[in-house]
Amino acid sequence: MEGAREEELTSMSSLVTVFEHSRTPATGPRDHQQEEVHPHTACRPPQLPGPWERPDVEEALAASGPRTVSRRYLNSLKNKLSGRAWRKSCQPGSCPSSEPQEPEKRIVQELLETEQAYVARLHLLDQVFFQELLREARSSKAFPEDVVRLIFSNISSIHQFHAQFFLPELQRRLDNWKATPCIGDIIQKLAPFLKMYSEYVKNFERAAELLATWMDKSPPFQEVIVRIQSSEASANLTLQHHMLEPVQRIPRYELLLKDYIQKLPAQAPDRADAQKALGVIFSAAQHSNAAIAEMERLQDLWEVYQRLGLEDDIVDPSNELLREGPVHKISFRRSDPMERYLFLFNNMLLYCVPKVIQVGAQFQVRTRIDVTGMKVRALPDAEFPHSFLVSGKQRTLELQAGSQEEMMSWIQACQAAVDQIEKRNETFKAAIQGPEGNPPEPELQSEELGLRAPQWVRDKMVTMCMRCREPFTALTRRRHHCRACGYVVCARCSDYRAELKYNDNRPSRVCLHCYTFLTGHVLPGDKEDKRRGILEKGSLVGSGQSLMCSFLQLGGDKWGKSGPRGWCTIPRDDPLVLYVYAAPQDMRAHTSIPLLGYQVTAEPQGDPRLFQLQQSGQLYTFKADTEELRDRWVKAMERAAQGWSPQGPDDGELSS
């Protein structure tokens, strides 16, 4: 037993290295070419360049236009996940056996056999398709290596995990079934690492689009794939079919484990471990399901944006479409209502006109009404039944629905969006925890703007404008303070004057948001602040929302031996990622590091305040202000590297 335990510890120590690419794509080409190996032997995962740092990839996607191939795969995915046809190949009792088996052992046998087939499929994807395409890309230069790496995502890490750890563990346990008739402990130990599938699932749709694009664009690319698809190893199945297999795998584990638990006797020793293992598998499945739902949401959102003409101030991947549909606009000059179309998002209502000639965009956006401050109510109008009023900062509209039910549905949807915005604003805390403690809330309530002097945000607490989020510079973009809310803003965002009661009603410099609120003036569209595009989407970490946060001295390969100080935080709602900001109240991080699978080392150079993150040649060095702070950071990062997530609002908080 001691030898088996030692072997298990050694296995778990080696397993951590599998995740070097499960969430964090590396940059730059590999130093050497990976050789083809047997699926049960080690294979070093290739480094994956960051998906937003690939000009060749983005150019190819832009040139390819909208494609429907990935939508078909998603539908196929849903259908296959809901059925059990995948189990027909080896149902319990159908496989030949020399002696009768217990029901639970037949389930374990089925799990092992399907795992063997799955590892063979992963070998085909990783060591055949992936490596052959990489070799062709390097030799012919007909297509970029980055395209190949993005298509296959972290398939090498997944292959290595199953071939080197999960499958051998299952095989050893089944070989010694009489001595240890249980698998719950194995699955409970290894299942947390299945969360690496989220990265693969999130990338699946984009990979399918790239695959279809380059199959049409590059004959050498197509030739390699067709040749492998026609081989005996591929069983005449397409690469897309093989790529779908990892997406389906976690739900299959869940079904098999449920069957295993049902077959166990009531007093079986493995029941408790198997129940815990099922919970861990369910958590991993939720990660994949959430990734699939996010893909579908983004796909639907992109289709809506295409119908609207892809206007820069509208396209934002964080938006959520709540409702859309036709209405009629009641005109003050015309007797008959005009046909219009509404798109209600979580943050805005788009009032659109259908285009007569629908080439490209189907609708033209006439007015955008922010949900913040919007009011909606029914209109008792005998001439126009089922009418309702939408009043916003930008415009007031009298609209008519097709029926009473449709009118009430619109009112309820709009009101729900308004209530959600108001709830978020009420609970949002703008102050960020500083190194000396928690400063007071710097932003006044809206009804207090101009009535009393605000608390100014200190200059050193921000490195970018708190309104437009553009970085400050010494010459061209200097810091200014809004005299109404106290925010640090740039000259463009504070080029307004409003009378403030606390300042004896003298005109004072204010930001655009406060100017609109205090004066009621809505600026023309060409002067309003445009919405930010997809790549400029910022992020804000609020106080009380982090598991750990403080200033750290940065170093290592990325920042050099003596790098700058950065505000580092591990958010509660994203507990496996470290975000690094230039200042505590910045609204956009300059670096994010997915921590899953990283090795955390304390005192790497004999300095008691130093610690390091290391994975696959990447090295990040941090220096805390005190040893106690370093110990808390090491603990927080070790938990994140192992896939730990908080279960409650106060679980695991280590913030300083």
Image (cartoon, rainbow, N blue to C red):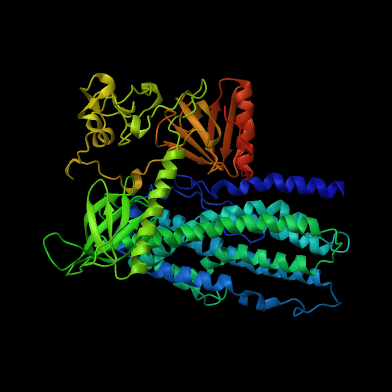
| Res 74 visible | yes
Q: Is 538 positioned to the left or the right of 26 in the image? A: left
Q: Is residue 654 above or below residue 288?
A: above
Which residue of the protein is positioned furthest toward the left in this rendering?
333
In which quarter of the view is residue 519 placed?
top left
Seen at 38% across and 27% down, the residue is 462
Q: Is 389 positioned to the left or the right of 429 in the image? A: left
Q: Residue 533 in the image: x percent, y percent?
A: 31, 47
Q: Residue 105 in the image: x percent, y percent?
A: 80, 69
In which quarter of the view is residue 587 placed?
top left
Q: Is residue 298 above or below residue 548?
A: below
Of residue 511 and residue 576, the one placed in the foreground of this image is: 511
* Quarter in which the C terminus is drawn: top right
Q: Residue 459 in the image: x percent, y percent?
A: 36, 22
Q: Is 263 positioned to the left or the right of 411 in the image? A: right
Seen at 57% across and 63% down, the residue is 246
Q: Residue 18 in the image: x percent, y percent?
A: 61, 49
Q: Is 15 positioned to the left or the right of 381 in the image? A: right
